[in-house]
Amino acid sequence: MRLDILNHGYRPATRALFTLIRVFSGRPLPDAAKLTFYRPDFYGARAKRFTHAAMRGPSAWSVADRELMAAYVATINESSFCIGAHTATAAQAYGDGAIVDTALSDLDSAPIADGLRATLRMLGKLTRDPNAVTPADMRAVLASGVTPEQIRDALAVCAAFDTTARLADAFAFDLLTSEGYAAGAKFLLARGYR
């Protein structure tokens, strides 16, 4: 159920900022960004810091790999808004949408590294049922060449986008056009999640 607060629950200065963004970009601010401006002290500021660190902070995973993780978690959660946003961002980051499309539709045949494949499998299992992940699952990821630090980084991506996907669905975020997702992806790759 879409809450009217996403359309009108902002201070005048924030509404002016939204207008400026629309004027200069030619597009309205996506609901995911709007939500971070509503009660920023409660959710928005913390969410932006955590998500930016997970997605753009130091990591052995590339930005493209982390965006693919976000798209994969969104796909498991069946969150249309997040699937569109992070599929577009991962495709731009890799410079190849076919890699992303294949990973999301048939992980076994995707042209990605075995460590990333094993990590995505584990994230998928975790997203479906947090209690189902076992030490054997984590040993399988480690055996694929992924380091404990990479597992930690992947878990941070999963946490950020499990939360975002649930909010997107709970608040019925408006879906964007393919051009809107592409523009958002360009912005995320240039500026991150701040």
Image (cartoon, grey):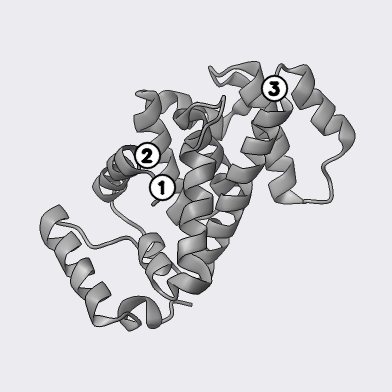
Name of the residue lying farthest toward the left? 23
N-terminal of the pair, mark 3 or mark 2, is 2
Q: Are marks 1 and 2 in contact (CB under 8 Å)?
A: yes
Q: Nearer the viewer, mark 1 or mark 3?
A: 3
Query: At numbered mark 2, what does the secondary structure look like: helix, strand or loop?
Result: helix
Seen in the image, is 128 located left or right of residue 38?
Answer: right
| Mark 3: amino acid | Val
- Please say if 9 is above or below 171: below
Query: At numbered mark 3, what does the secondary structure look like: helix, strand or loop?
Result: loop
Picture coordinates of residue 139, whole percent (x, y)? 83, 26
- Given residues 97 and 44, the one toward you in this image is 44
Q: Quadrant of residue 19?
A: bottom left
Identify the disc placed on residue 111.
none
- Please say if 154 is above or below 97: below
Q: Quadrant of residue 73?
A: top right
Identify the disc placed on residue 84.
1
Query: At numbered mark 1, what does the secondary structure look like: helix, strand or loop?
Result: helix
Seen in the image, is 94 located left or right of residue 132?
Answer: left
Picture coordinates of residue 77, whole percent (x, y)? 60, 52
Identify the disc placed on residue 146.
3
Picture coordinates of residue 171, whole percent (x, y)? 48, 71
| Mark 1: amino acid | Gly
From mark 1 to mark 2, how far is it between C-alphas? 6 Å
- Given residues 4 and 53, the one toward you in this image is 53
N-terminal of the pair, mark 1 or mark 3, is 1
Residue for point 45% across, 29% down: 64
- Given residues 101 and 134, the one toward you in this image is 134
Picture coordinates of residue 1, whole percent (x, y)? 48, 77
| Mark 2: amino acid | Ala
**Where does label 2 land, which residue?**
88
- Given residues 81 and 70, the one toward you in this image is 70
